[in-house]
């Protein structure tokens, strides 16, 4: 111990005291060599970085509290933080990425220092927002995350076998981003499926933690280093023989574009004085004015505000400039001067054509009268809604596919953003019963499920008058590993004026005085989501469907309930009454650049939530499925795997998602050795 402190490092979270420790020089050298071997042998190495990575740059962190701390003490003024230079650790991580040893970076900080160090923007998942990306505003603890970035995090978690947790307290914050560190740690300990192709007796992989303070995940780490990050990574660079690039002059502040009198040569858009409209992110549709260059070469913007919001200042990092594809996805350029500043019709001034996120108040407007009465509210007329009335099997078929929507709780603020939900549903036989599964990209919301849970499974039933009942069961929490109370969603299936399908109603959860709230779900025209039928040995029969969605980069859904002693695809005879199994997976990019292979986990029971370290009995069985995703000659999507496992999407032929590669030859070549290894190690 080099600095004692009785205070909690992160009050209110699962963190210990702020005591600090340092390894002896001999121990540090040995640990760094071991970490280097793990990085060198990793199939997918991901950096997971917190505030401690940037303290040496001059940015203050939350957890350093000890008097006489060994952490870097230089602190810049807060207004100067966006102009600071990356640290030695940032530069070494950039060298790892450049040499193909670092395959992903989940960044909890907002500072843009990985990009200033030379890491491509596409390689950094800024899960908590960025100061330099107007489509990804910063979020506080417990606030909604950008859904595409959260989906990317879930996919990275599936593929990561070595995680470098650097400068983070790993205190299980509400975003559950710690799952990217915990899952490879448990994989290395045999408590999660191993990566495809890795021999069962391989000792590789795991979690490497580098920080001065203890964390809750130290006990499951493969390598635990107590040192400053700059010291540890300087030694790691030497151990791996990395060539660490020097900083470009404009990265250091004061020598950027402003001192050179403008932006990059030949840059026509964006430039100071130009105008545009945001094309992505939570503020999409918001008018933007480009103001001036900063001393670090970034471009200062003024966002004129979403509906009813005041204008605010933002920055566009200089690494975006010249990337025409990214800029085209970020902005829609104005066709004439002043066009961006003009309010959109009906949106107010200044305004946007995009509606704000759903809230409790906005969800109430879609409720059928009986659901409003269930919540103790007066009925609100739902204009243009026509309840679906048909034989029960036809109502169940209308429910098949991908549904997206929101749920809110009546005890929350009326204007609090509702929890987003995404689920896939399939009909089971002629009885009007349903199975399905889904997830929420905002686990901290805790509306229909416990706070911190992400995935859930669904059982349901339909009626001929369009009434639908869904029973939703979420992942278990760490505090209460026994099964949480299920949530019951009671809704009315209706057709909107535009011809789409809407399920709106009320939900309730918990015994006694349950929590209540409204929800709305809209069926989304997803091309590869719905009812999948078994089409191979060991996959069951066509009468026992799976509910699956292939939405790059994720694959998720529900499998039929498992009969005792059966294999992966053998369902129980009481399928409509038995609880389905959760399946979650990720699509894997092949050499051809397309996403045509997958890895998935199939759970015998609902798991403990992904970022929680559970110490209970290890009775949970997780089966690993790996294989390819393709279109057969008739145009029907297929999932194929080891042991003759095969699923085929029911219904008419459908084209693949835009990012899915339909020629699976390269993916099959890449997975051949992995499949052979899996077949050898799988139970006969």
Image (spheres, rainbow, N blue to C red):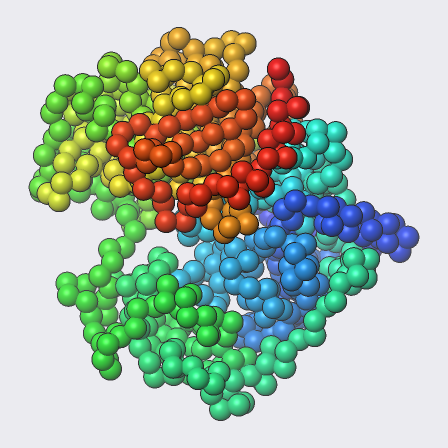
Q: Position of residue 474 (x, y in %)?
A: 44, 29
Q: Nearer the viewer, residue 636 or 174?
A: 636
Q: Position of residue 571 (x, y in %)?
A: 43, 14
**Furthest-right residue in this view:** 26
**Does 616 appear above or below 219?**
above
**Does 185 appear above or below 62?**
above
Left or right for 453, reference 374: right
Q: Position of residue 353 (x, y in %)?
A: 22, 61
Q: Nearer the viewer, residue 198 or 468?
A: 198
- Quarter where residue 373 is shown: top left
Left or right for 94, reference 153: right
- Quarter where residue 672 is shown: top right
Q: Nearer the viewer, residue 177 or 448?
A: 177
Query: Residue at 54% of width from left, 26% of height from top?
Result: 642
Query: Residue at 74% of width from left, 29% of height from top?
Result: 201
Left or right for 168, reference 440: right
**Does 556 appear above or below 124?**
above
The quadrant of the image that shows the C terminus is top right
Does residue 474 appear in the picture of this structure? no
**Does 256 appear above or below 48?**
below
**Furthest-front residue in this view:** 633
Q: Position of residue 237 (x, y in %)?
A: 77, 61
- Quarter where residue 202 is shown: top right
Query: Residue at 40% of width from left, 73% of height from top?
Result: 313
Does residue 278 appear in the picture of this structure? yes
Query: Residue at 30% of width from left, 69% of height from top?
Result: 332
């Amino acid at each position: 111990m080099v600095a004692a402190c009785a205070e909690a490092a992160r009050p209110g979270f699962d963190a210990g005291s702020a005591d600090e420790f340092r390894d002896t020089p001999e121990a540090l050298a040995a640990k760094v060599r071991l970490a280097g071997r793990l990085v060198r042998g990793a199939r997918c190495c991901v950096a997971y970085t917190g505030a401690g990575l940037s303290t040496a740059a001059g940015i203050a962190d939350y957890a350093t509290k000890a008097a006489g701390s060994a952490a870097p003490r230089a602190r810049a003024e807060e207004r100067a933080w966006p102009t600071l230079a990356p640290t030695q650790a940032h530069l070494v991580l950039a060298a790892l990425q450049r040499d193909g040893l670092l395959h992903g970076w989940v960044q909890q900080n907002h500072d843009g220092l990985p990009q200033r160090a030379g890491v491509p923007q596409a390689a950094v998942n800024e899960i908590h927002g960025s100061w330099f990306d107007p489509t990804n505003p910063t979020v506080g603890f417990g606030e909604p995350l950008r859904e595409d970035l959260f989906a990317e995090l879930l996919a990275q978690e599936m593929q990561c076998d070595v995680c470098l947790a650097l400068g983070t307290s790993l205190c299980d914050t509400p975003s559950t981003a710690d799952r990217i560190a915990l899952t490879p740690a448990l994989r290395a300990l045999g408590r999660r499926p191993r990566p495809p192709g890795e021999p069962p007796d391989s000792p590789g992989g795991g979690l490497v933690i580098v920080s001065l303070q203890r964390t809750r995940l130290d006990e499951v780490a493969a390598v635990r280093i107590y040192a400053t990050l700059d010291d540890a990574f300087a030694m790691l660079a030497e151990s791996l023989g990395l060539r660490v690039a020097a900083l470009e002059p404009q990265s250091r502040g004061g020598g950027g574009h402003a001192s050179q009198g403008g932006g990059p040569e030949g840059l026509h858009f964006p430039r100071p004085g130009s105008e545009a409209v945001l094309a992505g992110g939570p503020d999409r549709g918001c008018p933007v004015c480009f103001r001036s260059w900063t001393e670090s070469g970034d471009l200062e913007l003024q966002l004129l505000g979403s509906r009813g919001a005041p204008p605010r200042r933002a920055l566009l990092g200089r690494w975006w400039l010249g990337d025409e594809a990214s800029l085209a996805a970020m902005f829609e350029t104005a066709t004439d001067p002043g066009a961006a500043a003009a309010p959109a019709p009906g949106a107010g001034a200044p305004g946007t054509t995009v509606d704000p996120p759903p809230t409790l108040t906005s969800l109430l407007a879609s409720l059928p009268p009986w659901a409003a009465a269930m919540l103790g509210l007066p009925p609100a007329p739902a204009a243009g809604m026509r309840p679906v009335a048909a034989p029960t099997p036809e109502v169940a078929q209308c429910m098949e596919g991908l549904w997206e929507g929101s749920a809110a709780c009546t005890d929350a603020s009326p204007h609090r953003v509702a929890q987003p939900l995404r689920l896939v549903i399939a009909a089971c036989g002629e009885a009007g019963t349903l199975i399905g599964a889904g997830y929420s990209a905002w686990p901290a919301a805790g509306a229909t499920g416990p706070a911190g849970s992400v995935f859930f499974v669904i059982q349901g039933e339909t009626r001929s008058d369009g009434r639908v009942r869904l029973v939703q069961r979420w992942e278990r929490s760490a505090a209460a590993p026994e099964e949480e109370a299920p949530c019951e969603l009671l809704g009315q299936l209706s057709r909107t004026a535009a011809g789409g399908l809407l399920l709106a109603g009320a939900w309730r959860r918990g015994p006694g005085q349950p929590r209540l709230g409204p929800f709305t779900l809209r069926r989304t025209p997803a091309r590869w989501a719905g009812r999948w039928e078994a089409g191979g040995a060991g996959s069951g029969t066509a009468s026992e469907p799976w509910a699956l969605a292939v939405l790059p980069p994720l694959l998720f859904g529900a499998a039929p309930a498992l009969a005792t002693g059966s294999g992966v695809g053998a369902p129980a005879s009481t399928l409509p009454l038995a609880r389905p199994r959760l399946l979650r997976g990720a699509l894997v990019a092949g050499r051809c650049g397309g996403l045509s292979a997958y890895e998935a986990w199939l759970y015998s029971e609902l798991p403990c939530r992904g970022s929680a370290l559970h110490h209970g009995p290890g009775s949970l069985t997780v089966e690993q499925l790996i294989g390819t995703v393709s279109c057969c000659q008739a145009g029907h999507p297929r999932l194929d795997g080891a042991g003759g496992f095969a699923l085929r999407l029911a219904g008419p032929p459908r084209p693949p998602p835009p990012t899915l590669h339909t020629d699976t030859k390269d993916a099959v070549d890449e997975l051949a050795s992995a499949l052979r290894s899996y077949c050898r190690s799988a139970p006969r």
